[in-house]
Image (tube, rainbow, N blue to C red):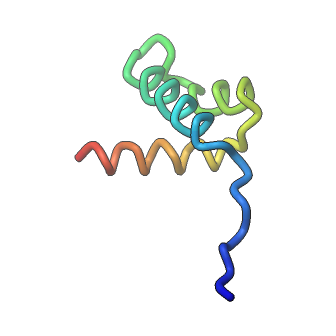
């Protein structure tokens, strides 16, 4: 019997939404400062998790 690994803490829909919001906020100089922390706090996501998602999202776009 194979292990499936740890269950995901955050739903995929939340990950996609948070990533889109953060990338969009970082593009605008008026909202860039503190955007990761602000969006993570609003959505109840750990800041470092969101930072990782944004980095992965940028890497996929390249």
Residue occupying image coordinates x 73% and y 23%: 42
Residue closest to the far top: 30
Q: Quadrant of residue 35?
A: top right
Q: Quadrant of residue 11?
A: top right
Residue closest to the far left: 62
Residue occupying image coordinates x 53% and y 50%: 52
Q: Quadrant of the N terminus?
A: bottom right
Relative side of 53 to 58, left or right: right
Number of marks drawn:
0
Residue closest to the far bottom: 1
Residue occupying image coordinates x 66% and y 73%: 4
Residue occupying image coordinates x 47% and y 20%: 25
Q: Position of residue 61 (x, y in %)?
A: 27, 43
Q: Against 28, is 14 above or below?
A: below
Relative side of 45 to 18, left or right: right
Residue toward you, 23 or 3:
3
Q: Position of residue 58 (x, y in %)?
A: 35, 43
Q: Against 9, is 41 above or below?
A: above
Q: Position of residue 54 (x, y in %)?
A: 47, 42
Relative side of 3 to 35, left or right: right
């Amino acid at each position: 019997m194979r292990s499936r690994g740890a269950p995901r803490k955050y739903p995929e829909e939340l990950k996609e939404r948070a990533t889109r919001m953060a990338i969009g906020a970082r593009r605008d100089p008026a909202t860039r400062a503190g955007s990761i922390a602000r969006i993570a706090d609003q959505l109840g996501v750990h800041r470092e998790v969101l930072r990782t998602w944004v980095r992965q999202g940028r890497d996929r776009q390249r």
